[in-house]
Amino acid sequence: MPTIYLVLAQLARYSLVGGIAFVIDFGLFALCLYALEWHYLLANLMGLIAGLTLNYALSISWVFSDCERRLENRKLAEFSVFAIVGFIGVGINELLMLLLVNFFCVQEMISKMIAATIVLLWNFCSRKLILFKERKTDDFGKRD
């Protein structure tokens, strides 16, 4: 069972990666929404796709680098699962945006921040549980 410290360290790294991905996501969202005058849901989707791609690359190379990857030898399957979790997150994000903006009359940018925080937690927990084992071990069964 992973120690709480390992999980908290991963969550901290994931939050940093999520923050970087969010800046890309949020910036592209704002560009599409205000400069290109796209509908807010389409602008939101474009930002989310860019953030997902960056998040995958950094999660594999840094966030969960001290864990065994359950699908490491099946990279297409690994990326597919990562993306499916992300697309479920996109659906959650879109639903939250729809509810917050249309039903609760929360401003679009504030709605985006609320939705992104909730989806960050969904993505971390889901990806951690599905794609990564506790920790890497060496040839003698010792943990790195």
Image (spheres, rainbow, N blue to C red):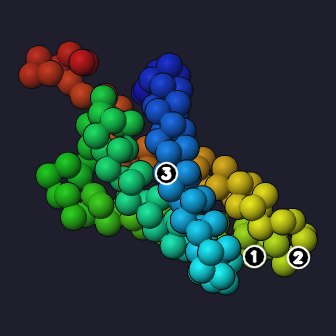
**Mark 3 falls on what kind of element?**
helix
- Viewport quadrant of the C terminus: top left
The one of 93 and 45 positioned closer to us in this rendering:
45
Residue 79 x/y as whole percent: 30, 61
**Mark 2 falls on what kind of element?**
helix
Q: Is residue 22 left or right of residue 81?
A: right
Please name the residue that numbered disc 2 is placed on.
103
Quarter of the rendering containing residue 136: top left
Please name the residue that numbered disc 1 is placed on.
98
The one of 39 and 67 positioned closer to us in this rendering:
39
Residue 112 x/y as whole percent: 70, 61
The tag earlier along the polypeptide, 3 or 2, is 3
Circles 1 and 2, Cβ within 8 Å, touching? The answer is yes
- Viewport quadrant of the N terminus: top left
Q: Which mark is residue 21?
A: 3
Q: Is residue 57 left or right of residue 126?
A: left
